[in-house]
Amino acid sequence: MKPAFEIRERSRVYVGPVGDLLTGALPEGRVVVVTDATVERFFAPLLAPYERLLVGQGEASKTLRTVGELYERLIDLGADRSTFILGVGGGIVTDVAGFVASTYMRGLRFGFVATTLLAQVDASVGGKNGVNVAGYKNMAGCFAQPDFVVCDPAMLCTLPDREFRAGLAEMVKAALIADGDLFAALEQSSFAALREAPEQLRDLITAAIRVKADIVGRDERERGERRKLNLGHTLAHAIEKCSDRMNHGEAVAVGIALMAGAARRLGLLDAAQCDRIVRLLERLGFDLQPPVPLERLLREAGHDKKNEQGTLHVVLPAGIGDCVVRDIPTAEFATLFTDAR
């Protein structure tokens, strides 16, 4: 089957049935799967042919300690430079598996089967791999493209509503960055309809991946345009550092809403479009109230890994399907939210 996208002629992204795609995508030779217990339970027949290493679930497992444990287990297995690492799971699994593969013995080939909506439309695509340090998101990591990513919408039926909704935040983000038609399609649907209409969902997943694949193809290492993919994430990462009440997608939704309000106050985004953004996120079921005081989030934002020499690359929506990046001194970032407090 022809891939839906090819990123920089190195990474193929497939959208379709994993049973039809995986065997053809894998190289010959030894395959070691990195996954978690829940994924292993749901997809046992798919994973049965391969050796498996399990990681814990949740952000608490996305650490250098987990990476070190996986290195030791790979050594125990006798994994060498010909071993292929297959990450099967959501964003935490693919982030960890990609980082381990990219650094074990100075780098093994690897690929992903993304089993959550968030991983399919964002986390597994684009070549960013990493783990958290001292609670700060993705502070240790690297850029390395997977050989392939398989995104099978049928696998999403196993997700709880909350985890499915988390992926919709990243889909809204992609639409705001570069696809007004995707945004309109989301407005015309509903959470329940998206859960129950696999063909529509497949089209929306493909559209969201296209936004990211196009941007990464032009700016793989985040020196310019790829920064747009961080829309909402500076504040989302601060939320995740300060509180465990929200998962990543829920925090991104709050971050997007806050940045839309900032863009409106700056005159970049008109009030009607700002209202559309907020209404869509609320219709999809997101609580847009930060779980901790905004002042605390703004203090934490200064520690974001996108802080360079006291300046943040701030992503602001300038319209539905259009974002801009402004370099703002960290000390002035809080002024964007003066009227929001």
Image: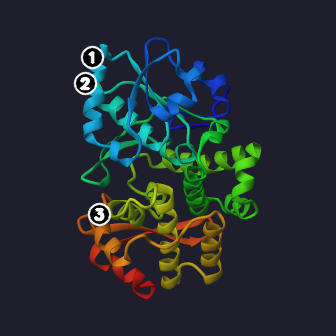
Quadrant in which residue 24 is drawn: top right
- Secondary structure type for disc 3: strand
- Secondary structure type for disc 2: helix
In the rendered image, the quadrant that contains the N terminus is top right
Quadrant in which residue 142 is drawn: top left
Q: Position of residue 63 (x, y in %)?
A: 29, 43
Residue on which disc 2 sits = 72
Q: Rate crowding at label 1 as few (under 14), some (14 to 19) or many (20 or more) other CA atoms within 10 Å.
A: few
Q: Is residue 244 left or right of residue 249?
A: left
**View extreme (bottom): residue:** 339
Residue on which disc 3 sits = 307
Q: Position of residue 204 (x, y in %)?
A: 68, 50
Coloration mode: rainbow
- From mark 1 to mark 2, how far is it between C-alphas? 6 Å
Q: Amino acid at mark 1?
A: Asp
Q: Is residue 142 left or right of residue 164?
A: left
Q: Is 82 located above or below residue 183 in the figure?
A: above
Q: Amino acid at mark 2?
A: Glu
Q: Is 328 located above or below residue 128 in the figure?
A: below
Residue found at x 48% / y 83%: 266
Q: Position of residue 25 (x, y in %)?
A: 56, 22
- From mark 2 to mark 3, how far is it between C-alphas? 33 Å
Answer with mark 2 or mark 3, whichever residue precedes in sequence: 2
Residue on which disc 1 sits = 76
Residue found at x 29% / y 63%: 307
- From mark 3 to mark 1, how far is it between C-alphas? 39 Å
Q: Is 267 located above or below residue 164 in the figure?
A: below
- Secondary structure type for disc 1: helix
Q: Position of residue 288 (x, y in %)?
A: 52, 71
In the rendered image, the quadrant that contains the C terminus is bottom left
Q: Amino acid at mark 3?
A: Asn
Eye-nearest disc, 2 or 3: 2
